[in-house]
Amino acid sequence: MTKPFNFLSNLKKPFKSFADKDTRKEEDLEKIAAQEQKLFSFETLSSATKDFHQSNKLGEGGFGPVYKGKLEDGREIAVKKLSRSSRQGKKEFMNEANLLARVQHRNIVSLLGYCAHGAEKLLVYEYLPHESLDKLLFMYRMRTVYSSDRHSNRREELDWKKRFDVIAGVAKGLVYLHEDCHITIIHRDIKASNILLDDKWVPKIADFGMARLFPEDETHINTRVAGTNGYMAPEYVMHGNLSARADVFSFGVVVLELISGQKNSTFNQDAESSCLLEWAWKLYKKGRSLEIIDPTLALIGEAIEQVKMCIQIGLLCCQADPTLRPQMRRVVVMLSKKPGSLEEPQRPGYPGSRYRRTSRSSHLGSSRPAASSSNAGSSGGSSSNTYVSTFNTNSATSTLTSPLPRPNGKQPIEE
């Protein structure tokens, strides 16, 4: 791990301040990069991507476009190019470079190097041939001048084994970020488009532009809300309360999307359900949870029981009360066992949902309380402990009938 840490400390120097980039000596950057063997010249990346041609464009993130490239030695790469007009992108660019230089895991995308050429700032990653999960799962139609329906009919490639392996792999990646890395990292933007698949369909968590380091002695931090509609936990949307449980919620959404083939934020399968979470919850309570399964999946035997277990795990991760969500290490344990009895999930955090916050679960960082009854999502009990949550998934605005108390009276850390 020495090399990543050296890379991190050295990487901060040339990128520390974009305001003084005109006075920075590029020779210093080249010297540092040569020592770490992480430097890519702009000419090399321009040649690899055919001058960043539109036909090589893979997508566009928070700080700029991403291009596919091929080096002279035959290696395929993905190049993120910072948009000069994106002020927020500069922050995300530095954040991603800093964090990815710290981490090494099978289920997290690898940062190969970087390039600084005047105003041009680029990050270089391993290229993953199956690209992002959303392009397969949601059957996007990518009609452009250079390609037609490139991903429109690929959902059938995602059989149940591949989908289960994605679920298990992302869970392991989150365990590493939350618990096994030298410092807790909260991703803040776990979603299908930020899960990349390599040539063997191994999932890798990508896009750390909004990730946050998490202090060990805090149960949560208060921060500016940033994320993607349909994947953000209600306590984070409403109050900016961020903990590892926010990533757990997002993971639960991805699990249910993988099983159903439906996108939570654009769900229209059931007129009486506002989103995928509500639909899955209603069917689960009626004992009909298997009805959410993607019709392209052919399931037999043990696979059916495994899917039922994953639906329940997804709902457990999406519970409105963050203290009831399992930690990711426990999720990995549940996924590694044969389908068996799990506790009953309470109501998930979707618009208009309600949950009762009990005194036993007053700390976001505490161990998970004992299982509650299947009717615990109702709005009974003392008004001082009952929180009625209403949030708009499109505008990320919210109201709450009573303020959420801070654990142990600790003051939040401002971003």
Image (cartoon, rainbow, N blue to C red):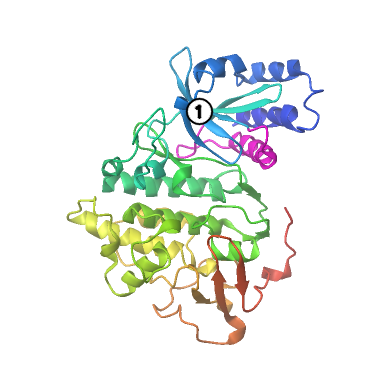
Q: Position of residue 264 (x, y in %)?
A: 42, 58
Q: Position of residue 354 (x, y in %)?
A: 50, 76
Task: Inspect the image, locate mark 1, and give the three-letter code of the amino acid beneath it.
Answer: Tyr
Q: Give the magenta range.
A: 83-110
Q: Is residue 1 visible?
A: yes
Q: Is residue 252 visible?
A: no
Q: Position of residue 158 (x, y in %)?
A: 29, 43
Badge 1 marks a residue whose secondary structure is: strand
Residue denoted by label 1 = 67
Q: Is residue 88 magenta?
A: yes
Choose between 133 and 393: the one closer to the eye.
393
Choose between 205 and 239: the one closer to the eye.
239
Does residue 26 appear left or right of residue 260 in this picture?
A: right
Q: Position of residue 3 (x, y in %)?
A: 61, 27
| Residue 114, picture quadrant | top right
Asked if residue 372 is positioned above or below residue 302 in the image, the reply reads below
Residue at position x 68%, y 53% from top? 215
Q: Is residue 225 magenta?
A: no
| Residue 399, picture quadrant | bottom right
Residue at position x 60%, y 46% from top? 211
Residue at position x 74%, y 56% from top? 414
Q: Residue furthest top?
A: 72
